[in-house]
Image: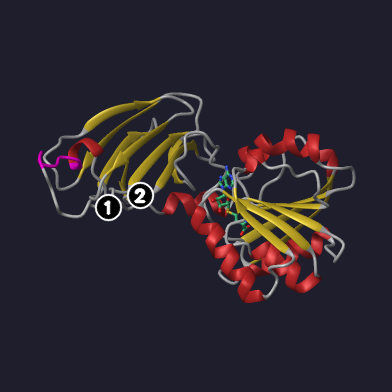
Amino acid sequence: MKRRPIFRAFAAVLVVTAAFAGVSACRPEGPDKSPEPAAAPETTLRNVTSDPVHYTIRVLFSNVGPMARTLAPGTVDRFSSRTAMDLQFSNGDHDKLYRLEPGSAHSFRLDERGKLEMFKGAHGLADAADLAPYVPTPMPVVEKMLETAGVGPEDIIYDIGCGDGRILITAAREYGARGVGVDIVPERIRECLAAAKAAGVERLVEFRRQDAMTLDISAATVVTLYLLPESNLLLRPKLEAQLRKGTRVVSHNYTIEGWESRGAKSETLTDDVGTEHAVYLYIK
Ligand SMILES: C[S@@+](CC[C@H](N)C(=O)[O-])C[C@H]1O[C@@H](n2cnc3c(N)ncnc32)[C@H](O)[C@@H]1O
């Protein structure tokens, strides 16, 4: 299974500020007329591997020492803090050290060599899968996805994890196609609504905040994906159960494991910073 730039993009980042809830939440007893301070942002760490992850975390500018933690598979640790935290863990070969920004979401996943790594995430909700961090598809790749899927005015496109809505807005503007996009991060949906309005296509596209795993996609004639390979796999039963025969599924960079026989076409293109992108078309 190929892991392309989205994975590298996750690995690159990670600088934070945070402080544990217990550390930052001390307030004096008794009447207090001062305004309620804004809640400290929440930084989250999710374990997407199938083994427990052992790590230590240290709050910067606090007198709390490093804390050793074990995160069970599929669970999320949360830290409310206003100052940075340093995270340390071993990938079996060497120690990895990251500084975490307050209010950011992260996932422990295996990298392309099967080694433990920390990646940027989209959200820290424990009850919804984190299908991929927000990395928008470059516009030339959006164009290629729509062209590869043969999108036209009769289509209803579902973008699963729609980010800023660029795929559906482009499809509406250039081809007159209708679209439904969901994203779990409220800020993304606000961006989608503003962009749809600015492009004058609000009547053709619908955006809502929703966990993609709960979305009914049976009305789609085209589905667009830019998610991690394991997320495509997680979605596969939904695609198989809900999509009508003949529906086109177009995926940026990642294949749908097990759908080799449905593969109709693949294209590659290089963006203006020299990164190669793949577009895979499947027919249900
Ligand atoms: C790589 S981005 C792709 C955005 C857009 N489709 C594009 O190609 O430009 C993946 C998006 O999936 C969203 N996401 C992650 N987990 C999700 C979930 N459980 N339900 C809905 N959206 C999710 C993220 O917030 C992010 O915006």
Report how far apart the C-alphas of labels 2 and 1 lie in the structure.
13 Å
> What amino acid is found at the position of numbered circle 1 in the picture?
Ala
Residue at 84 percent across and 59 percent down: it is: 155
Q: Could you tell me what secondary structure mostly forms the magenta stretch?
A: loop
- Quadrant of the snapshot with the C terminus: top right
Stretch of the chain drawn in magenta: 24-30
Near-viewer residue (271 or 159): 159
Near-viewer residue (226 or 91): 226
Residue at 15 percent across and 48 percent down: it is: 61
Residue carrying label 2: 103
Secondary element under disc 2, as helix, strand or loop, is loop
Image location (x, y in percent) of residue 157? 76, 56
Residues tagged 2 and 1 counted as in contact (Cβ below 8 A) = no
Badge 1 crowding class, 10 Å Cα cut-off, few under 14, some 14 to 19, many 20 or more, is: few
* In the displayed structure image, the side of residue 133 where residue 2 appears, left or right: right
Image location (x, y in percent) of residue 253? 66, 52
163 inside magenta stretch: no
Image location (x, y in percent) of residue 227? 62, 47
- Quadrant of the snapshot with the N terminus: top right
Residue carrying label 1: 38
State yes or no: Cβ of the residue under disc 1 lies below 8 Å from any atom of ligand 1: no
